[in-house]
Image (cartoon, rainbow, N blue to C red):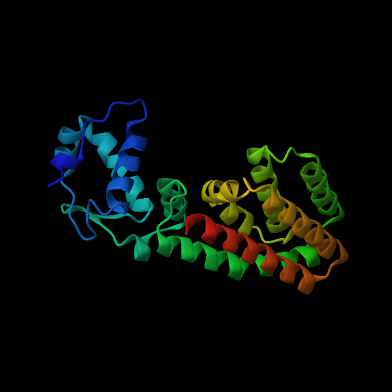
Amino acid sequence: MLEPLIEPLRTDSLKDVFVLRFEELILSGKVKIGEKLPSERELALQLGVSRPVVHEGLVELAARGLVSLKPRFGATVNDYRKEGSITLMASLIQYQKGKLEPELLESLLQIRMLLEPAFAKLAAQNRTPEQIREFYGILEKENAVDSRNIQAITDLDFEFHLLIAVASGNTVYPLLLNSFRPVYTNLSGQFFKDAKVFAVVRNYHRNMAAAIESGKGSKAMSVMKEILQHGEKHLRKMIG
């Protein structure tokens, strides 16, 4: 039964809050995979909202791969690992607020190591003169930033990696990287509190910009792997 888990919704964006509430219930395991949800009428009564709000919320949850909707049967909770979409991946990261489950954290680290070196190589091959200027513009900002301004450092680091994604020429990867921005900046912001870490990363960025400018794809791949290994080392130390 869902009654103890649900409180009436009171907000101007009822559908959005409905979706967020059920994302949390499903992703936390409070509502189990395979469980049938109450009817739209029952949910509307329990939550104190209209049936159209419930219906629109369930349609959105279905679009994210969290539930399946069947006529005259209702909504059933999916196994989001099999049914989830890229939209759900972003939602999952937002839901965790950077406090990732170990399995999800490992998966993210593996994905970065698989993708980012390849895109660094593409960036060296495909970058434009304007993008080269942008890389060195970020380096200038990193040289000038106050080492105590963690937010600015974190934003510049993300901007550098995002520019690599854009310079690669792949139109999907920047969108994918942007979807990870909340967790990326949350975690990197924590280890940038160590000024020594920022000094090392800034040097890596200089090496990366030089490799991309010279068109040396293999060098760009090598530097990116060093960047990721350095970040992973400090991240594990931080959360260990």
Q: Is residue 13 left or right of residue 181?
A: left
Q: Quadrant of residue 12?
A: top left
Name the residue: 56% across, 47% down: 190
Front-lying residue, 222 or 2 = 222
Query: In the image, is residue 115 above or below residue 190?
Result: below
**Image location (x, y in percent) of residue 72:** 16, 52
Residue under the image location 78 percent in, 57 percent down: 203
The residue depicted at 24 percent of the width and 60 percent of the height is 33
Q: Nearer the viewer, residue 51 or 113?
A: 113
Query: From the viewer's perspective, is 178 left or right of 206?
Result: left
Q: Residue at x 59, y 59 (%)?
A: 234
For residue 144, side relative to residue 82 (left or right): right
Q: Is residue 172 visible?
A: no
Q: In terms of image quadrants, where is residue 171?
A: bottom right
Percent across and percent down for residue 198 are 70, 50
Q: Is residue 37 visible?
A: yes
